[in-house]
C-alpha cells in the first residue's frame, strides 16, 4: 500500500485494500497504524477519505528500500474517459489534468503558498498582483463566506487542484477569456487554441495536442458522464 502511494497520488482505503490483497477492514487497521507512525496522512472530502504519504521523507525512505529490494511496482492508471480526465468542472472550479498542472505551477512560481495545517492556500503579494492582471479579484474572493483556497484531491489524477473561492474565480476567468469552453450537456471542458497559447505564455504550461483545440465529440451525454464524487 505504501509503494502504491509513492507516485504522489491519493487513494481510498478500498483501492489500497485491492492493491494489498487484503479485506477492507484489514486495510483500515493497517492504515490506522501507518497514520499513528506518521507514514501516511488522510484527507476527508465529502463522504470519501483519501490516503497519501506523510511527506517527501517517507517517499525517499521507500525509494531507498526499493533499491535494496530490487523491485518496482506497476503504475496506477485510473479508468477514466480521456476528455473528462484532461479538463472538466468540479462543482464550481477547474478539475482534471490541466487543473493539477496549474495548481503545481502556481505553487512553483510562488503565486500561492501552503498555509498550516497543510491543505489551505494563501495568495502571495506577487500572486495577488499577477492574478489581478488576469481579472481575479483576490480580495473579493477572500471576503466570501466560504473557504478561500484549499487542496481538493482530483478524482481522476489523485493529486490536488485548487478549490474554494479562488478556484471558482480562476475557472470564471478561464471561461470569460475563452481559454476553455464548456460542453452544453457535460462537465467536460475543451481548451481552445487561445487558451493553449495563454496557458503556455502566462504559466509555462504546454497542452498535449490530443487534449485541446478540437471540436467536442457528438456523443450522447449519458455515455460521456460517469458517476464519481467530483
Image (tube, rainbow, N blue to C red):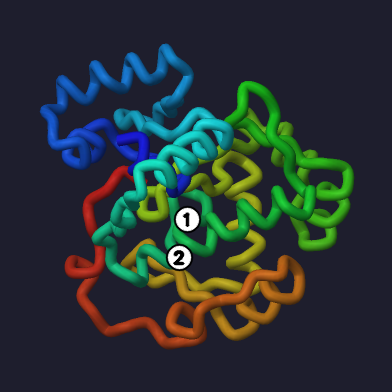
Q: Residue 20: x and y, percent?
A: 20, 36
Residue 9 showing in the rendered view: no
* In-image side of 174 versus 183 (left or right): right
| Quadrant position of residue 4 | top left
Q: Secondary structure at mark 1?
A: strand
149 and 34: which is toward the camera: 34
**Residue at point 53% right, 55% down?**
100
* In-image side of 25 versus 156 (left or right): left
| Quadrant position of residue 201 | bottom right
Q: Residue 110: x and y, percent?
A: 79, 48
Q: Residue 222: x and y, percent?
A: 18, 66
Quickly name the residue at label 1: 95
**Residue at point 24% right, 68% down?**
224
160 and 91: which is toward the camera: 160
**Residue 87 numbered tag:** 2
Q: How many marks?
A: 2
Q: Residues within 10 Å of mark 1 (few under 14, many from 20)?
A: many
Residue 17 showing in the rendered view: yes
- Whether residues under marks 1 and 2 lie with C-beta atoms below 8 angstroms apart, the answer is yes
Q: Secondary structure at mark 2?
A: loop
Amino acid at each position: 500500500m505504501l509503494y502504491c502511494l509513492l507516485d504522489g497520488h491519493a487513494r481510498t482505503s478500498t483501492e489500497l485494500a485491492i492493491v494489498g490483497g487484503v479485506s477492507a477492514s484489514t486495510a483500515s487497521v493497517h492504515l490506522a497504524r501507518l497514520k499513528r507512525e506518521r507514514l501516511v496522512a488522510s484527507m476527508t472530502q465529502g463522504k470519501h477519505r483519501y490516503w497519501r504519504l506523510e511527506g517527501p521523507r517517507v517517499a525517499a525512505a521507500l525509494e531507498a528500500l526499493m533499491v535494496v529490494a530490487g523491485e518496482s511496482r506497476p503504475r496506477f492508471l485510473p479508468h477514466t474517459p480521456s476528455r473528462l480526465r484532461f479538463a472538466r468542472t468540479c462543482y464550481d472550479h477547474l478539475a482534471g489534468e490541466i487543473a493539477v498542472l496549474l495548481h503545481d505551477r502556481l505553487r512553483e512560481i510562488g503565486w500561492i503558498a501552503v498555509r498550516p495545517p497543510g491543505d489551505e492556500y494563501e495568495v502571495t503579494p506577487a500572486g495577488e498582483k499577477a492574478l489581478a492582471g488576469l481579472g481575479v479579484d483576490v480580495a473579493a474572493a477572500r471576503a466570501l463566506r466560504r473557504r478561500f483556497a484549499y487542496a481538493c484531491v482530483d478524482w481522476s489524477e489523485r493529486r490536488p487542484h485548487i478549490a474554494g473561492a479562488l478556484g471558482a474565480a480562476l475557472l470564471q476567468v478561464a471561461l470569460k477569456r475563452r481559454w476553455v469552453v464548456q460542453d452544453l450537456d457535460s462537465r467536460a471542458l475543451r481548451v481552445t487554441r487561445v487558451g493553449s497559447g495563454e496557458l503556455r505564455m502566462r504559466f509555462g504550461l504546454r497542452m498535449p495536442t490530443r487534449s485541446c483545440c478540437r471540436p467536442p465529440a457528438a456523443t450522447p451525454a449519458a455515455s460521456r458522464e460517469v458517476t464519481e464524487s467530483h
